Image (tube, grey):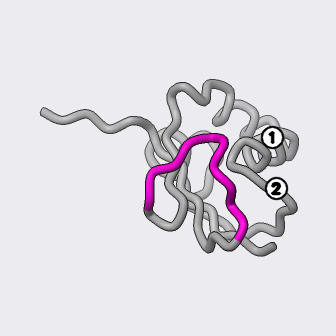
Amino acid sequence: MSLELRYFAWLRERIGLPGETIETGAATVADLVDELRAREDRYALAFSDMGAVRVAIDQELAGLDAPIAGAREVAFFPPMTGG
């Protein structure tokens, strides 16, 4: 399946891209993250602490166990704080 990925804040800096289109066979967000980590060191570094990363599937917050079948976009970003 073709999937649009978006990276924000320090994730974008570590990966070096604001986003990309990939082909994946991942069933869940966790599977997708495992695929990305295996690609290159920069992805492994960006996704080394998933406790510091939030995920949205088609602009809806989701957990690592969320299925991605039928999704068009997955975004990764750090937790947001108010102030």
Residue kind at label 1, given as amino acid type: Asp
What is the crowding at mark 1: few (fewer than 14 residues within 10 Å), some, or many (at least 20)?
some
Element class at badge 1: helix
* Quarter that holds the C terminus: top left
Q: Residue at x 83, y 47 (%)?
A: 35
Q: Which residues are magenta?
A: 60-69
Q: State the mark number for residue 6.
A: none
Apparent side of residue 30 relative to residue 34 in the rendered image (left or right): left
What is the crowding at mark 2: few (fewer than 14 residues within 10 Å), some, or many (at least 20)?
some
Q: Residue at x 72, y 66 (%)?
A: 69
Q: Residue at x 87, y 40 (%)?
A: 38
Of residues 49 and 43, the one nearer the viewer is: 49
Residue 34 place in picture, x, y as percent: 80, 40
Residue 44 place in picture, x, y as percent: 75, 34
Apparent side of residue 9 relative to residue 69 in the rendered image (left or right): left
Q: What is the CA distance from the residue labelled 1 to the residue labelled 2?
A: 9 Å
The mark closer to the camera, 1 or 2, is 2
Apparent side of residue 68 relative to residue 19 in the rendered image (left or right): right
Name the image quarter holding residue 72: bottom right
Q: Residue at x 63, y 70 (%)?
A: 71
Q: Does the residue at mark 1 contact the one at mark 2 (Cβ under 8 Å)? A: yes
Residue 66 place in picture, x, y as percent: 63, 49
Q: State the mark number for residue 26.
A: 2
Residue 70 place in picture, x, y as percent: 68, 73
Element class at badge 2: loop
Magenta segment: does it hold 6? Answer: no
Residue placed under numbered mark 1 in the picture:
34
Residue kind at label 2, given as amino acid type: Ala
